[in-house]
Amino acid sequence: AVLRLTLSRGVGQRGYSPRGADKPTLVMTLHPLDSATTGLLPRWRARTTSFRLAAGELLAQFKTCNKLAQILARAEAEAAGADEGLLLNTDGCVVEGAGSNLFWIEGKTVCTPPVAGGILPGVTREVVPELCAKLKLQFREADIRPEELAQADGVFLSLSTHGIIELVDLDGSPLRSSPLTTLLSQAYWLQVRTECG
């Protein structure tokens, strides 16, 4: 299952001031986990969306309930028949998916946008460099533009509820498939089974 914890300051006065909100509220929701744990590599289609994230936004590093741009990006992508929406930042670089972190492959190097680009550093995103080290793959953070992403040797996403997801299509055009994506997915699920039983 997937357990989501949401913590707020609690109820305070009307408006933006946190004054008086001194009794925190904790909400927990439990959702069944879909077939992601089967170890099969999901393959999704993505769409570059019109919504932008502020480059260098410090608050982007925190998982908050203020994810309107991501919600609208996912809705835009789904309306276009895609599984995920990719967001660019105000510098024009692709930085993340609506609910996922972005990676691409250049030869035997796995790349991902830097946190400073305005992304949420996801839990599974933090595991990918560890997997690369175990598999003796190079790993680096870099900026990338949509037209460069389309030329990568492979593109994948990470998110806790699905692990590694291969992107097979971007804006209606097929993407290259790298065997490293499958290798990373297998290594991810092996680590999950090892650590969680």
Image (spheres, rainbow, N blue to C red):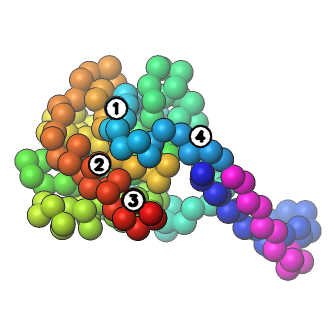
Q: Which residue is tagged 1? A: 43
The type of residue carrying mark 3 is: Arg
The answer to which of 145 and 25 lies nearer the viewer is: 25
Whether residue 34 sits left or right of residue 17 in the image: it is left
Res 71 label = 4
- Residue corresponding to mark 2: 185
Q: Is residue 109 left or right of residue 27?
A: left
Q: Amino acid at mark 1?
A: Arg
| Percent x, y of residue 185 | 29, 48
Q: Identify which residue, 95 or 100, lies in the foreground.
A: 100
Between 158 and 92, the one nearer to me in the picture: 158
* Label 1 crowd bin: few (<14), some (14–19), many (20+), radius 10 Å: some
- Please provide percent x and percent y for residue 65: 66, 56
Q: Residue, x 30% and y 43% (percent of image)?
A: 156
Q: Closer to the N terminus: mark 2 or mark 4?
A: 4
Query: Is residue 18 in the magenta section?
Result: yes
Camera sees residue 9: yes
| In this view, the mark in front (4 or 1) | 1
Q: Which residue is mark 3?
A: 193
- Whichever of labels 3 and 1 marks the residue nearer the N terminus, that label is 1
Question: Please, what is the three-letter code of the amino acid marked with disc 2?
Answer: Ser
Q: Earlier in the sequence, mark 2 or mark 3?
A: 2
User: Mark 4 to mark 1: distance in Å?
Assistant: 21 Å
Task: For the residues labelled 4 and 1, say whether their Cβ atoms are less than 8 Å apart.
Answer: no
Q: Nearer the viewer, mark 2 or mark 3?
A: 3
Q: Position of residue 48 (x, y in %)?
A: 39, 33
